[in-house]
Image (cartoon, rainbow, N blue to C red):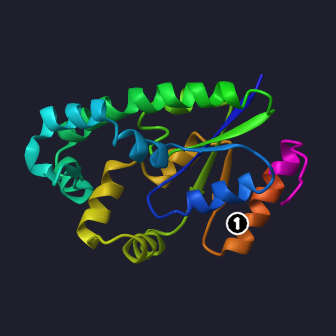
Amino acid sequence: MTKIIGLTGGIGSGKTTIAKYFKSFGIPVYIADDEAREIMQSPEIINAIKNTFGEDIFENRILNREKLAKIVFNDPEKLKKLNSIVHPAVKKHFELWLIENKTFPYIIYEAAILFESGRYKDCDIIVTVTAPIETRLQRVLERDKTTRELVLKKMEAQWSDEKRIAKSDFVIENIALDAAKREVDEILKILKIKQKHT
């Protein structure tokens, strides 16, 4: 049976960078946020979003993600509604992906809201990536065209590091990437995953 390693961390913690490092050892990685973005382009999901949040968040028939983010991260009920549209579709997609990768002893399921969505219950091992809040803020502001206020709202909507760590098997502190990679190497040794770095 393929074991699922749940990889999580708050926005800006650098969990996708860590996921890519795991991938370099030949471990299949499913990045839930990326897949959700793709799934949100499907006509079925677009219609559900339109019916729930209205036409205003579309420009030339293209979803304005920033507008949608401002709506949902200012209203927990609306965030719940969006998640109830997107999460079941991502879950179905992941289950098909898992079947395709069933010959691997381990796979990584990377998700920002692994705990909040309840998906952590499907994982055999949980790894949380942490970084100081100010570091995370800077990373997101450099990466995305967004505001400090919106990033803080997104952080508020997620679990705290303390809460995540309490439910995790491993914690990677991702301030300096080299040190974080050494922590990944250590996890691979503990799990007896053969390290064939590519």
Q: Quadrant of residue 99?
A: top right
Residue 197 painted magenta: yes
Give the residue at x 71% y 43%: 28
Residue 169: percent from the left, percent from the top? Answer: 68, 42
Q: Main secondary structure of the magenta part?
A: loop
Give the residue at x 48% y 38%: 115
Above or below, comparing residue 127 to residue 77 in the picture: below
Residue 50 painted magenta: no
Q: Label 1 is placed on what type of residue?
A: Ala
Q: Nearer the viewer, residue 35 or 84?
A: 35
Q: Is residue 112 visible?
A: no
Residue 101: percent from the left, percent from the top? Answer: 71, 32
| Residues in magenta, as a range | 188-198
Give the residue at x 89% y 53%: 195
Does 115 sit left or right of 98 as displayed? left
Q: Nearer the viewer, residue 8 or 16?
A: 16
Above or below, comparing residue 49 to residue 68 in the picture: above
Identify the element where label 1 is drawn.
helix
Does 11 sit left or right of 168 as displayed? left
Residue 173: percent from the left, percent from the top? Answer: 63, 64
Q: Quadrant of residue 80?
A: top left
Does 26 sit left or right of 145 as displayed? right
Which residue is the extreme one toward the front?
60
Q: Badge 1 is on which residue?
A: 180
Does 54 sit left or right of 24 as displayed? left
Q: Is residue 125 visible?
A: yes
